[in-house]
Image (cartoon, helix red, strand yellow):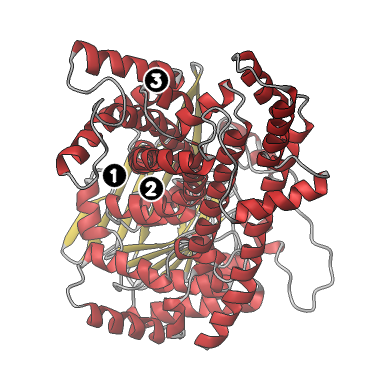
């Protein structure tokens, strides 16, 4: 019995999803490979002309040599099919090419440096806003008369309708300038060297993360709140909720076990998507707070036409979203018994 | 001593949208008594106020529904409670599920879709009695389910794994965990095929016979009433048209509406075509004047259009509201 179920789980549930997961990544990365090659600009020429324009006196021969070297470095030598295979070969070795903007630092090491900062900031922020938004959203539709919840709803709606960089700037001005309790920018004090073994340094990084995190939480809260409220307002009139009320069950039991338990399911899928997109950073927010994460990296790469960096971040983002959705898909039967082994 | 005494009950749905108020007189002057140890049937077409009546007597009045007039009094042994005035806390502590339980319309979807059946039992028992000994609770619940002829496996199943008939039986098992004085069953057999219907009805009858409690059975299905109910109330447009012992109602129906309902039942060996009653039940936002049945009544008289017929007792326990019938006519 146990074995049979296990086999059923592996062949009917797990393997199809693994295939789907790998297909999504494959297609996504292939598209990332094709699109820059359809663009009218040539990164090699752009690079060469910048170097020439910067005044380096180079003879035509060395320019030609540089051109060949760069073409090779960007994986642009050979026919498109050859390029495609070299591209995958490099990818498997973790080689995303050199950054054009910070030549010749490899893209992978720059992303490797920025990614932990982004994840440390975004994942807790997403989770906190998810929990609060959903709990308050469900409560506000179950207790429509509650004054405090009404105030929270209005605040959430107001903050959500303001562009998030404005929210960021307002928080920055209020809590770093007028009431200077939080630092202005960065992920740690200027001039210090990152030292993750020192508790003092870790405390400093937390202090630096408060305002960016608060921005993300405030913005995210409204979204989860509204989503959960509309999901639960349908569930409240479902027969099993009315029944639980007629049976005189405690309000808390009804709210958590009967209403939220079913309403949370689509929200979990949405959470997986949001966690996936964390890998491309929070673009403008990171710029406003001068935070050294993926988002800042992406913005700079876009400004400076840093193709390999843009591709690198896109690939991380594709893998991030696909993995998060894949993991959620595997965990989903634990939350919703109706999809078990289907 | 009546278990439940309803007197002159008026329950309306009052809504106001853009300043236009609308009143639907779903239950309009209903009086009746329920006694211990009986199966009392309530019959009538859709939208005649059956479900509203149940909502009021089970204490689930929520806006826009309002009970404007009348009283709903229960007497459970030496404890009595006024349903329209009791606080929600009192109802929760002393009345709900312990004295009055409810098998809802659409009972098939009353089970939480993402939890096992046992969880709903646990919630109900824990709320009303508290569970101190988990093992004992499990044993008692298994025994209870077994007594009703259900396999104990259903407790570990999720609702979607059970058939409609099984879910209906689970709902009945849930309604009887505490041996309540009154079980209200709202359309318990609707949406079930006849074979399953028979099983469910038998289950209700057996439970009633064993625990001698009262069952209030609401359904539009006259055949079900004929099989199960001891006494029967025929509702029309928010009022009682006729009430009496089931046999009397079926053998000598006095109200033209009751006569029509009974004539619409197929009989074994009968070959005539069934004639359906012209028209539909009135819109209860604007009910007809006088007798509410007069627009559809084949024997309509002038008095019917202006005067509301009173509910008169024609025989012991047989009451009817029709101008054709006078108190002394029988």
Q: Where is residue A27 in the image (x, y as percent from the top left)?
A: 71, 50
Report whether mark 2 lies on the same chain as mark 1.
Answer: yes
Q: Where is residue A303 in the image (x, y as percent from the top left)?
A: 57, 20
The reply to whether discs 2 and 1 touch (Cβ–Cβ < 8 Å) is yes
Question: Is A65 left or right of B154, judged from the image as shown?
Answer: right
Chain identity of mark 3: A
Of residues A64 and B41, the one drawn nearer to the viewer in this rendering: A64
Q: What element carries label 2?
A: helix
Between the residue at mark 3 and the residue at mark 1, the CA separation in whole angstroms equals 60 Å
Between the residue at mark 2 and the residue at mark 1, the CA separation in whole angstroms equals 8 Å
Task: State which quadrant residue A138 falls in.
Answer: top left
Picture disc at residue B84: 1
Depth check, mark 3 against mark 1: the one in front is 3
Picture disc at residue A273: none
Q: Is mark 1 on a helix, strand or loop?
A: loop
- Please give the name of the residue rendered at 71% of the width and 33% of the height, measured from the top-left corner: A65
Picture disc at residue B56: 2
Picture disc at residue A288: 3
Of residues B21 and B131, the one drawn nearer to the viewer in this rendering: B131
Q: Is mark 3 on a helix, strand or loop?
A: helix
Between the residue at mark 3 and the residue at mark 2, the CA separation in whole angstroms equals 59 Å
Of residues B94 and A250, the one drawn nearer to the viewer in this rendering: A250
The reply to whether discs 3 and 1 touch (Cβ–Cβ < 8 Å) is no
Chain identity of mark 1: B
Q: Can residue B305 be seen in this view?
A: yes
Report whether mark 3 lies on the same chain as mark 2.
Answer: no
> Taking B307 as reference, is A93 above or below it?
below
- Please give the name of the residue rendered at 51% of the width and 45% of the height, measured from the top-left corner: A276
Question: Is B328 left or right of A144, judged from the image as shown?
Answer: right
- Please give the name of the residue rendered at 69% of the width and 28% of the height, measured from the top-left corner: A62
């Amino acid at each position: 019995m146990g074995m049979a179920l296990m086999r059923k789980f592996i062949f009917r549930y797990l393997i199809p999803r693994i295939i789907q997961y790998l297909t999504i990544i494959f297609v996504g990365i292939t598209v990332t490979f094709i699109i820059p090659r359809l663009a009218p600009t040539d990164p090699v020429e752009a690079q060469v002309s910048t170097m020439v324009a910067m005044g380096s006196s180079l003879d035509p021969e060395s320019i030609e040599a540089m051109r060949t070297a760069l073409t090779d470095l960007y994986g642009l030598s050979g026919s498109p099919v050859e390029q495609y295979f070299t591209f995958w070969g490099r990818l498997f070795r973790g080689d995303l090419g050199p950054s054009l903007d910070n030549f010749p630092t490899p893209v992978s090491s720059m992303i490797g440096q920025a990614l932990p900062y982004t994840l440390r900031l975004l994942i807790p922020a997403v989770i906190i806003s998810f929990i609060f938004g959903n709990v308050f959203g469900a409560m506000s539709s179950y207790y429509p008369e509650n004054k405090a919840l009404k105030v929270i709803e209005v605040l959430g709606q107001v903050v959500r309708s303001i562009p998030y960089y404005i929210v960021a700037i307002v928080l920055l001005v209020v809590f770093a300038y007028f009431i200077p309790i939080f630092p202005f920018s960065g992920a740690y004090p200027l001039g210090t060297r990152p030292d993750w073994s020192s508790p003092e340094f870790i405390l400093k990084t937390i202090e630096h993360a408060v305002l960016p995190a608060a921005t993300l939480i405030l913005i995210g809260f409204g979204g989860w709140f509204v989503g959960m409220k509309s999901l639960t307002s349908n569930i409240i009139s479902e027969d099993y909720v009315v029944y639980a009320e007629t049976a005189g069950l405690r309000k808390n039991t009804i709210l958590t076990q009967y209403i939220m338990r079913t309403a949370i399911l689509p929200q979990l899928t949405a959470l997986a998507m949001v966690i996936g997109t964390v890998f491309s950073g929070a673009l403008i927010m990171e710029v406003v707070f001068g935070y050294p994460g993926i988002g800042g990296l992406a913005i700079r790469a876009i400004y400076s036409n840093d193709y390999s960096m843009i591709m690198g971040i896109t690939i991380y983002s594709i893998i991030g979203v696909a993995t998060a959705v894949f993991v959620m898909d595997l965990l989903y039967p634990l939350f919703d018994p109706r999809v078990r082994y289907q | 001593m009546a278990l439940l005494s309803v007197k002159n009950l008026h329950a309306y749905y009052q809504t106001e949208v853009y300043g236009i108020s609308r009143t639907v007189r779903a239950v309009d002057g209903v009086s009746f008594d329920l006694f211990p140890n009986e199966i009392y049937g309530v019959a009538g077409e859709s939208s005649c106020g059956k479900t509203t009546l149940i909502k009021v007597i089970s204490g689930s009045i929520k806006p826009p529904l309002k009970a404007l007039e009348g009283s709903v009094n229960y007497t459970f042994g030496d404890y009595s409670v006024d349903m329209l005035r009791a606080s929600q806390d009192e109802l929760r502590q002393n009345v709900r599920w312990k004295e009055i339980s409810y098998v809802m319309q659409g009972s098939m979807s009353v089970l939480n879709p993402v939890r096992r059946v046992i969880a709903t039992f646990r919630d109900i028992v824990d709320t009303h009695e508290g569970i101190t000994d988990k093992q004992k609770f499990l044993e008692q619940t298994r025994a209870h389910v077994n007594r009703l002829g259900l396999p104990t496996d259903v407790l570990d199943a999720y609702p979607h794994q059970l058939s409609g008939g099984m879910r209906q039986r689970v709902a009945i098992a849930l309604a009887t965990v505490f041996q309540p004085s009154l079980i209200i069953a709202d359309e318990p057999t609707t949406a079930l095929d006849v074979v399953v219907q028979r099983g469910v009805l038998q289950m209700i009858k057996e439970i009633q016979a064993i625990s001698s409690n009262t069952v209030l059975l609401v359904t539009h299905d006259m055949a079900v009433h004929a099989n199960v109910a001891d006494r029967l109330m025929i509702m029309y447009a928010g009022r009682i048209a006729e009430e009496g012992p089931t046999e009397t109602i079926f053998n000598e129906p006095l109200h033209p509406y009751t006569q029509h309902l009974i004539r619409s039942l197929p009989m074994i060996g009968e070959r005539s075509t069934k004639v359906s009653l012209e028209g539909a039940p009135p819109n209860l936002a604007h009910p007809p004047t006088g007798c509410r049945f007069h627009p559809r009544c084949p024997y309509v008289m002038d008095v019917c259009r202006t005067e509301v017929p009173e509910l008169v007792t024609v025989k012991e326990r047989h009451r009817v509201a029709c101008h054709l019938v006078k108190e002394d006519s029988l």
